[in-house]
Image: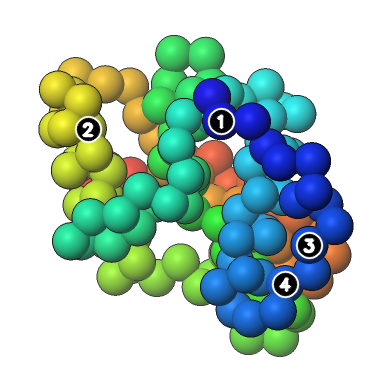
């Protein structure tokens, strides 16, 4: 488990990448308070990226973190399109294979943590591995 830097709360996002990192850190901390255990962040493959990988009890959880200023166009959760879901599934499959696992051998799920304005929404089992 990687420790969180103490100075992380004092950072103000300057660009989209920093803003994304800030919300991923907020999501990680919030999920840890809900009992999940951090495994990895920003796992990238040729298929795409997974923002967070965590454990909840015996379940491996792949988490997409999204942020939108407002819900005017459907909010943050609505921005996880079928194409984005496919990229996350492919990256998760790739990551599992590197850990000598697969969707058939590891209990896993796909969650979305959506920040819309000042609201946070945790969608468990937001989409399937198929």
Residue 28 seen = yes
User: CB of mark 4 within 8 Å of CB of mark 1?
Assistant: no
The image position of residue 116, as x and y in percent, is 73, 68
| First of labels 3, 2 by sequence position | 3
Residue bearing the label numbered 3: 11
Mark 3 and mark 1: span between their CA atoms? 18 Å
52 or 107: nearer the viewer:
52
In this rendering, which labeled residue sits more in front, label 1 or label 2? 1
| First of labels 1, 2 by sequence position | 1
Mark 3 and mark 4: span between their CA atoms? 6 Å
Mark 4 and mark 1: span between their CA atoms? 21 Å
| First of labels 2, 4 by sequence position | 4
Mark 2 and mark 4: span between their CA atoms? 32 Å
Residue bearing the label numbered 1: 2
The image position of residue 54, as x and y in percent, is 49, 31
Q: Quadrant of the N terminus?
A: top right
**Residue 98, located in which quarter of the rendered image?**
top left
Residue bearing the label numbered 2: 96
Residue bearing the label numbered 4: 13
**Residue depicted at x 68% and y 37%:** 4
Compared across the picture, whether 46 is left or right of 39 comes to left
**Residue depicted at x 40% and y 70%:** 81
Q: Which element is circle 2 on?
A: helix
Mark 1 and mark 2: span between their CA atoms? 20 Å
């Amino acid at each position: 488990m990687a420790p969180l830097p103490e100075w992380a709360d004092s950072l103000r996002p300057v660009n989209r990448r920093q803003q994304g990192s800030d919300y991923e850190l907020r999501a990680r901390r919030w999920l840890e308070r809900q009992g999940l255990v951090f495994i990895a962040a920003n796992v990238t493959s040729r298929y795409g990226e997974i923002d967070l990988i965590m454990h909840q009890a015996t379940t491996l959880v792949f988490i997409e973190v999204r942020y939108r200023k407002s819900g005017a166009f459907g909010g943050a959760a609505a921005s996880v399109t079928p194409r984005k879901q496919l990229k996350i599934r492919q990256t998760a499959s790739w990551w599992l294979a590197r850990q000598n696992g697969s969707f058939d051998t590891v209990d896993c799920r796909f969650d979305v943590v959506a920040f819309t304005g000042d609201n946070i929404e945790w969608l468990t089992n937001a989409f399937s591995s198929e």
